Image (spheres, rainbow, N blue to C red):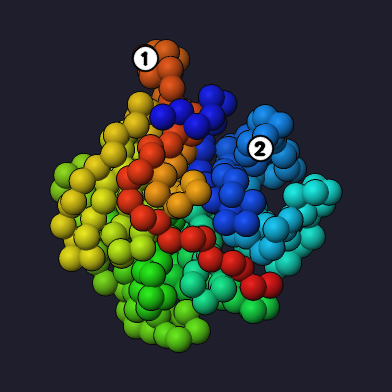
């Protein structure tokens, strides 16, 4: 069940690269991206916080950092800035993000101290970076229905997951509506991914699980992991049926870290559901 033993202070943004058949993920607070290949563990260090990525081609990722979207070459380690991302807001950083079926890339931001309402949801699409929604405290759960007509996102601080209809080009076509209200249950929606059947798989911070919700909002099942702060899921593996999940140490004192020795690691549960292939970002 443990995919990688390295403990992340804030693991996030798992991405299964469909060409490389390789998982990439981030340790936001330590400015690093992690992976594995046949040679063993891999790690890339950055000069600022990095949090999410989409794949452009075999050797390039679009990476979101606290101040930019950049094309990152995995073979050379060189990053080329594509667009500034709230570079005028040094107290903000990127958080959750994912490519959409139309070839765009959605990225959420937030205050580095989770300042209320400091974050936004942005979309990069064919040369344009546009703010879609503002006033978000902790942006999360960015994910898309298989037909490309619905997007989800969350404000973890409110305990709510919203969904919004999309037009043919992937831009919001209406006002977001409430999809899940987990606040009454004291649950914290974090990262999410939608499988090939339209089921939303949602990591729940503090609950040590990824929960599956049908399109009507009903709870179908949950997959437990041995870490309290499960942060973001991704489907991968040869047939896209393995559920990966990052986790975090953030917010845990020394006693809690000792009591949960696998906290911060990255996990995999085999044969869970049929995932979608991650969409390619069109630069």
Q: Are marks 2 and 1 in contact (CB under 8 Å)?
A: no
- Identify the residue at the far front of this view: 239
Q: Of callouts 2 and 1, which one flags the residue occurring earlier in the amino acid sequence?
A: 2
Looking at this view, is 21 or 215 the one in front? 21
Q: Which secondary structure, mark 2?
A: strand
Give the vertical position of 143 relative to 39 (above or below): below
Residue 61, x across and y down, in percent: 67, 57
| Residue 154 position in % (x across, y down) | 36, 58
Q: Is residue 204 left or right of residue 34?
A: left
Tell me if 120 is positioned left or right of 178 in this view.
right
Q: Tell me the quarter of the image containing the C terminus.
A: bottom right
Residue topped by disc 2:
37
> Pointer 1: residues within 10 angstroms few (<14), some, or many (20+)?
few
Q: Residue at x 49, y 72 (%)?
A: 101
The disc at residue 182 is: none
Between marks 2 and 1 in the image, the one whose residue lies nearer the viewer:
2
Q: Name which residue lies at 35% across and 43% down.
A: 271
Tell me what residue is drawn at x 59 percent, y 53 percent.
Answer: 17
Residue 253 seen by the camera:
no
Q: Quadrant of residue 245?
A: top left
Classed neighbour count for the residue bearing mark 2: other residues with Cα under 10 Å, few (<14), some (14–19), many (≥20):
few
Q: CA distance from mark 2 to mark 1?
A: 30 Å
Q: Nearer the viewer, residue 187 or 221?
A: 221
Q: Residue at x 59, y 49 (%)?
A: 21
Question: What secondary structure is found at the residue carrying circle 1?
Answer: helix
Q: Which residue is mark 1?
A: 259
Q: Position of residue 263 (x, y in %)?
A: 43, 25
Q: Position of residue 257 (x, y in %)?
A: 43, 18
- Residue 148 falls in image quadrant: bottom left
């Amino acid at each position: 069940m443990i995919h990688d033993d390295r403990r992340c202070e804030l693991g996030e943004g798992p991405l299964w690269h469909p060409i490389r058949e390789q998982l990439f993920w981030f340790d936001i607070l330590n400015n690093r991206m992690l992976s594995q290949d046949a040679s063993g563990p891999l790690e890339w260090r950055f000069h600022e916080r990095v949090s999410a990525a989409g794949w452009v081609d075999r050797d390039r990722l679009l990476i979101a950092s606290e101040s930019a979207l950049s094309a990152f070459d995995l073979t050379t380690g060189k990053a080329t800035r594509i667009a500034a991302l709230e570079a005028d807001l040094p107290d903000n950083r990127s958080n959750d993000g994912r490519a959409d079926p139309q070839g765009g890339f959605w990225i959420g931001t937030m205050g580095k101290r989770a300042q209320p309402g400091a974050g936004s949801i942005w979309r990069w699409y064919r040369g344009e970076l546009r703010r879609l929604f503002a006033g978000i405290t902790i942006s999360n759960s960015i994910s898309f229905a298989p037909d490309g007509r619905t997007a989800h996102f969350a404000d973890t601080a409110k305990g709510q997951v919203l969904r919004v209809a999309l037009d043919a080009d992937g831009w919001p076509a209406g006002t977001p509506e409430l999809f899940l209200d987990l606040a009454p249950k004291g649950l914290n929606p974090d990262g999410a991914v939608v499988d090939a059947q339209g089921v939303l798989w949602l990591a729940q911070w503090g609950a040590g699980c990824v929960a599956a919700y049908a399109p009507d909002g009903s709870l179908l099942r949950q997959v437990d992991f041995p870490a309290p702060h499960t942060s973001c899921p991704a489907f991968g593996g040869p047939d896209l049926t393995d559920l990966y999940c990052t986790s975090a140490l953030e917010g845990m004192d020394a006693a809690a870290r000792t009591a949960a020795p696998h906290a911060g690691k990255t996990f995999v549960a085999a044969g869970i559901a049929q995932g979608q292939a991650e969409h390619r970002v069109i630069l």
